[in-house]
């Protein structure tokens, strides 16, 4: 029981310190959106390379591997947001200290300082181009249908006959790629983990994915904003580690003094 109490007493505890609240909407938040957009484009480029590898016929490994890849993208965004959030909290603590000392705090300083909504603003700014594409695509997309396959070579001899040739000519008709088709290509590359989990041959579910693409494209970027919220906790852990290190240092100094006292020779008095 005493050991458990000692462990709880010596356990790491976060220490929250006051900080100067910054601005949620600023040019800095929009610039950070470029980093979010860059990560999304890298993730999409990796999807071009890995989409064929993760397209298994067996649904179980296909769903697991693509789900793991999606989770990896979310964690990358989450960790990046957490790192930026902790740095902003640290800067906001220094800015508040300067303000209390009567020193000037500029508008640029306030842009850097932590604000709970700044991570989500950066995430939405970075995802805005992809969100615009998916919204346009979701409003214009139509349900896909099966296309006619190629005719075998032995049928070509019947194409010259009037009775059969007109019917077979229908198989050679092809429609040119339209604006929606190019949008579909871009959206499917961005949402390739979801598409692979559904399966390329399931047109009904793919149509539902197309309709929900504006929401799906926001999942990974919003992890950046969620991670940014964790910045205050991570900074509090830093202060907790500093306090624990000081306690350990004082404890070691006290033990060292006690050992020096024990080693000192004691004077013996004659009676």
Image: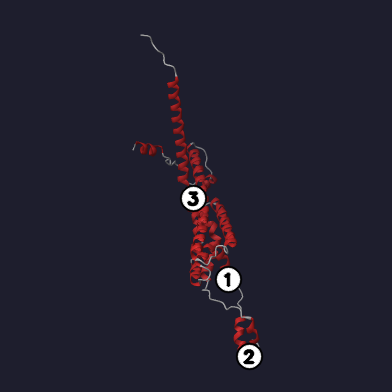
Q: Residues within 10 Å of mark 2 (few under 14, many from 20)?
A: few
Instruction: Tell whether 238 sits left or right of 8.
Output: right
Callout 2 secondary element: helix
Q: Is residue 19 visible?
A: no
- Between circles 3 and 2, the one closer to the viewer is 2
Badge number at residue 265: none
Instruction: Name the residue that disc number 3 marks.
Output: 228
Going 52% across and 62% down the picture, which residue do you hit?
A: 193
Q: Is residue 213 above or below residue 113?
A: below
Q: CA distance from mark 2 to mark 1?
A: 35 Å
SS category of the residue bearing label 1: helix
Task: Name the residue: 58% across, 71% down.
Answer: 181
- Rendered location of residue 32, percent (x, y): 55, 52
Quickly name the residue at label 2.
162
| On screen, residue 176 above or below 131 | below
- Disc with the residue nearer the chain's start (1 vs 3): 1
Please state if 235 lies on the left or on the right of 51 as rendered: left
Q: Which residue is mark 1?
A: 181
Which structural element holds mark 3? helix
């Amino acid at each position: 029981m005493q050991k458990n109490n000692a462990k709880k007493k010596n356990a790491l505890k976060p220490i929250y310190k006051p900080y100067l609240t910054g601005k949620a909407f600023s040019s800095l938040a929009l610039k950070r959106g470029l980093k979010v957009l860059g990560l999304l484009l890298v993730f999409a480029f990796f999807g071009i390379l890995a989409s064929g590898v993760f397209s298994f016929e067996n649904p179980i490994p296909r769903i697991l591997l693509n789900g793991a890849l999606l989770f990896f993208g979310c964690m990358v965004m989450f960790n990046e947001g957490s790192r930026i959030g902790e740095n902003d909290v640290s800067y906001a603590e220094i800015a508040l200290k300067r303000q209390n000392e009567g020193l000037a705090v500029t508008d640029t300083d306030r842009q850097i300082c932590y604000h709970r909504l700044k991570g989500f603003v950066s995430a939405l700014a970075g995802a805005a181009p992809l969100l615009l594409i998916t919204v346009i695509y979701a409003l214009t997309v139509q349900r896909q249908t099966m296309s006619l396959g190629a005719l075998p070579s032995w049928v070509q001899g019947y194409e010259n006959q009037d009775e059969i040739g007109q019917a077979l000519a229908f198989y050679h008709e092809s429609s040119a790629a339209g604006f929606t088709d190019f949008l579909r290509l871009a959206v499917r590359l961005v949402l390739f983990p979801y598409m692979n989990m559904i399966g390329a041959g399931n047109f009904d579910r793919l149509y539902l994915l197309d309709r929900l693409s504006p929401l799906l494209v926001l999942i990974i970027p919003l992890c950046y904003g969620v991670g940014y919220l964790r910045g205050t906790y991570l900074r509090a852990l830093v202060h907790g580690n500093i306090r624990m290190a000081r306690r350990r240092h004082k404890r070691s100094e006290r033990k060292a003094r006690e050992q020096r006292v024990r080693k000192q020779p004691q004077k013996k008095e004659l009676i």
